[in-house]
Image (cartoon, helix red, strand yellow):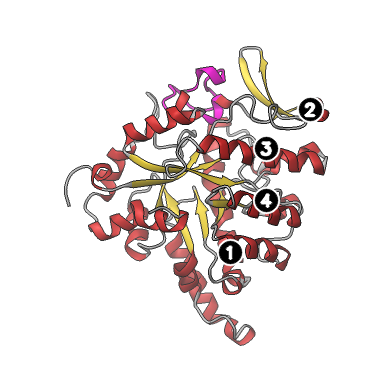
Amino acid sequence: MGSDLFDRFSVIDVDTHVTEPADTWTSRVSKKWGDKIPRLVRLGEKDVWVVNGEVAGAPGAFTMAGFDGTLPECRDTLDDCPPSAFDAAARLEHMDREGIRAQVLYPNVGGFGSGRFLSLGEPELMLECVRAYNDFLTEWTSADPERLLPVTAMPFWDVAAMVKEIQRCADVGHRAVLFPNVPETYGQPRVADRHWDPVWAAAQEAGLPISFHIGGGDISGLMRDEVGMGFKANFGRVSSLIFVENAQCIADLIFGGVCHRFPDLEFVSVESDVGWLLGLLEAFDWQWRNSGIRDEHPEYELLPSEYFERQIYGCFWFENEGARRAIERFPGNVLYETDFPHPTCMAPGPRMPAEHPRVYAQRVLGDLPDEALQKVLHDNAAALYGLA
């Protein structure tokens, strides 16, 4: 016990995002694709990303940390964003100020499962864009590979290409694999389908965990405000409900036998909270016993909660009692994140209610046992992502 947790523990932040620089794709993708290449465009006073002629978000909307307002208001241009969002050296300085040892890094423009690239319609270009992002991230994290931890984006529409990309990126130091949490929303097989077994096998062999980031599927239908509740209300509704997609994903991993078939492969439910996991896993265990699943699958040697404890992790960044209960029940399966610099991150602006990360951590976690805090703030993530 004692003062500031961020001074006492070597904190690993397992979910942050890089606001992609303007030349991320234009400098790395073959010029033969012309205007189809993802590019940053100035429309009026706003910078927006355009992919194959379609607006694909804005750097200001991805970078809300410290902004005086809430979406749809946002910073106008990339230059208006804090350098720590897009510049690796500035990010490291930000981490030093915050007391964060390392951060795990996720994308924006391509989506949280690479689904945005499907709109390109050209498989060769789609793959080239995924590889270009991964190459960018390799270069960006070279500023300090022990503190900036890259997660490999996936061309999920092509299993053979996925396997190659896992191997290619593992060889240059990537720490995890990003996979769409509900691939069926893109017309692909569900996570439980054996279609994906070569991918799980490649990741297991490479020693890389699989990350399921919320919003990794097609959420365009969920985003439609069909009842006129308003942008902010609908944004809050969607931002909460997409946690449920990761519950479905975890169910597929366990009930579909993925955990059983790949016992050394680890999975992370990213930016989805942890409080709901207790009730979900109690339901899983009850239905597992009540439905006679072992009569059908005698090879399943564990209960769902035991599979979870063996190889699945959840992440939290704003919860209070939910986080504490999850840590008490599953201290070896909970990871801490800030979601920097996203709209719901723990980096408040003048009109945002979020606390500063170290203030939040001290208030919510400060009286937990040191053994649990060591696991949650450092050891679990260090083991998962190969840090000493």
Residue 377 as seen in the image, left or right of residue 112: left
Residue placed under numbered mark 2 in the picture: 31
Which numbered circle lies on residue 204? 1
From the image, tell me which residue sits under label 4.
165
Residue sitting at the far front: 171
The amino acid type of the residue labelled 1 equals: Gln
Q: CA distance from mark 2 to mark 1?
A: 35 Å
Give percent across and percent down for residue 354: 37, 35
Query: Is residue 69 within the magenta segment?
Result: yes
Q: Residue at x 42, y 64 (%)?
A: 278
Indicate the position of residue 216 as horizontal and vertical percent values.
Answer: 62, 47
The front one of 73 and 39 is 39
255 w.r.t. 269: above or below: below
For marks 2 and 4, give the CA distance.
22 Å
Tag 4: amino acid: Glu
- Mark 2 and mark 3: Cα distance apart in space: 13 Å
Identify residue for label 3. 132
Local crowd size for mark 1, using a 10 Å CA cut-off: few (<14), some (14–19), many (≥20): some
Earlier sequence position, callout 3 versus callout 1? 3
Circle nearer the N terminus (4, 3): 3
Residue 355 in picture, x, y percent from top left: 33, 35
State which region is magenta: 60-81
